[in-house]
């Protein structure tokens, strides 16, 4: 090609880009989601002022649990860190007694409850909650070699269950008329069943999938019947503007792929609820 033609072609290209900048590059054509505006008042302003977002959790794999170095990881822990980063603060994870989660919020010892929390009527009446972001169910866990003997709810009524105090699992046990012992954490219910001090437990499907069966911490246990279906949300104090800020963050995270990418790290991508 002659030099004059190259110059002409370059001039035409430059003119086209100037007239239609959206065509300048594929990267530029895919606009980044707009940053979420950080409120300058309410609970969010208080969080920014103190420099940390205090997140109430329990040891609940795959939502919040510790890695080998003792750092909190999990789907919820990772998302909490991303929200804290966008607020310009540090995340602080505080283990709480799940039965006292509302009290912890109201005492301002934590800013939110972010731990695979089922959006029950009680929770939604007692907290300002985010939109649902993850699907779940309450399932029965028992020794794999006994699963075939308990194929329906009626047969389960002869068993002694372990459940987490104040959880959706405890509510499911009550609703079905099961005998049960309430313990501090969902993970403790699995220890009870494994040790034989309880016949079965009721826990979240996401935890049961991560912690029971071949290649897990409890290979001799399995999960069977789904007693309920439910959705997870994050709880904040009543009147707090933190819940709405997190809602907007979730819309951004869903739009830019962060939500699904984070879920995929823990095998939860199929449980994610679209955010709009």
Image: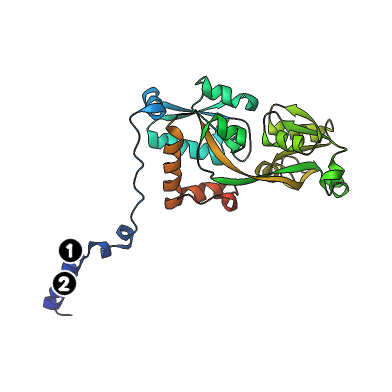
Q: What is the tally of numbered marks visible in this picture? A: 2
Q: Secondary structure at mark 2?
A: helix
Q: Is residue 276 above or below residue 166?
A: below
Q: Is residue 275 above or below residue 187?
A: below
**Residue 191: horizontal and vertical position, in percent?**
76, 32
> Given the current orientation, which residue lies at the most extreme left position?
4
Residue plotted at (30% across, 58% down): 28
Q: Secondary structure at mark 1?
A: helix
> Given the current orientation, which residue lies at the most extreme top position?
107
From the image, tell me which residue sits under label 2.
12
> Given the current orientation, which residue lies at the most extreme bottom position?
1
Q: Is residue 230 above or below residue 163?
A: below
Nearest to the eye among marks 1 and 2: give it. Answer: 1
Q: Residues within 10 Å of mark 2 (few under 14, many from 20)?
A: few
Q: Quadrant of the N terminus?
A: bottom left
**Residue 94: horizontal and vertical position, in percent?**
55, 25
Residue plotted at (45% across, 29% down): 239
Residue plotted at (53% across, 33% down): 235
- The disc placed on residue 18 is 1
Q: Residues within 10 Å of mark 1 (few under 14, many from 20)?
A: few
Tell me where residue 231 sits by quadrant.
top right
Q: Is residue 199 left or right of residue 262?
A: right
**Residue 257: horizontal and vertical position, in percent?**
46, 52
Residue plotted at (42% across, 43% down): 248
Please report whichever mark, 1 or 2, sits nearer to the chain's N-terminal start. Answer: 2
- The disc placed on residue 176 is none
Q: Name the colour scheme.
A: rainbow
């Amino acid at each position: 090609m002659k030099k004059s033609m190259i110059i002409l072609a370059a001039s035409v290209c430059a003119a086209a880009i100037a007239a239609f900048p959206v065509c300048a590059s594929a990267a530029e054509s895919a606009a980044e989601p707009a940053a979420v505006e950080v409120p300058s008042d309410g609970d969010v302003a208080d969080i920014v002022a103190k420099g940390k977002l205090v997140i109430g959790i329990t040891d609940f794999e795959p939502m919040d649990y510790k890695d080998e170095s003792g750092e909190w990881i999990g789907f919820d822990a990772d998302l909490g860190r991303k929200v804290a980063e966008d607020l310009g603060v540090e995340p602080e994870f505080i283990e709480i007694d799940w039965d006292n989660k509302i009290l912890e919020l109201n005492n301002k010892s934590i800013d939110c409850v972010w731990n695979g929390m089922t959006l029950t009527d009680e929770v939604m009446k007692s907290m300002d909650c985010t939109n649902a972001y993850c699907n779940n169910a309450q399932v029965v866990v028992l020794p794999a070699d006994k699963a075939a003997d308990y194929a329906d709810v009626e047969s389960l009524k002869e068993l002694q269950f372990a459940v987490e105090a104040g959880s959706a699992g405890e509510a499911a046990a009550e609703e079905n008329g099961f005998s049960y012992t309430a313990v501090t954490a969902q993970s403790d219910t699995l220890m009870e069943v494994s040790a034989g001090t309880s016949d079965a437990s009721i826990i979240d499907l996401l935890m049961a999938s991560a912690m029971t069966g071949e290649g897990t911490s409890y290979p001799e246990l399995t999960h069977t019947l789904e007693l309920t279906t439910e959705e997870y949300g994050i709880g904040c104090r009543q009147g707090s503007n933190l819940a709405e800020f997190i809602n907007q963050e979730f819309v951004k995270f869903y739009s830019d792929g962060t939500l699904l990418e984070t879920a995929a790290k823990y095998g939860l991508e199929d449980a994610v609820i679209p955010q709009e």
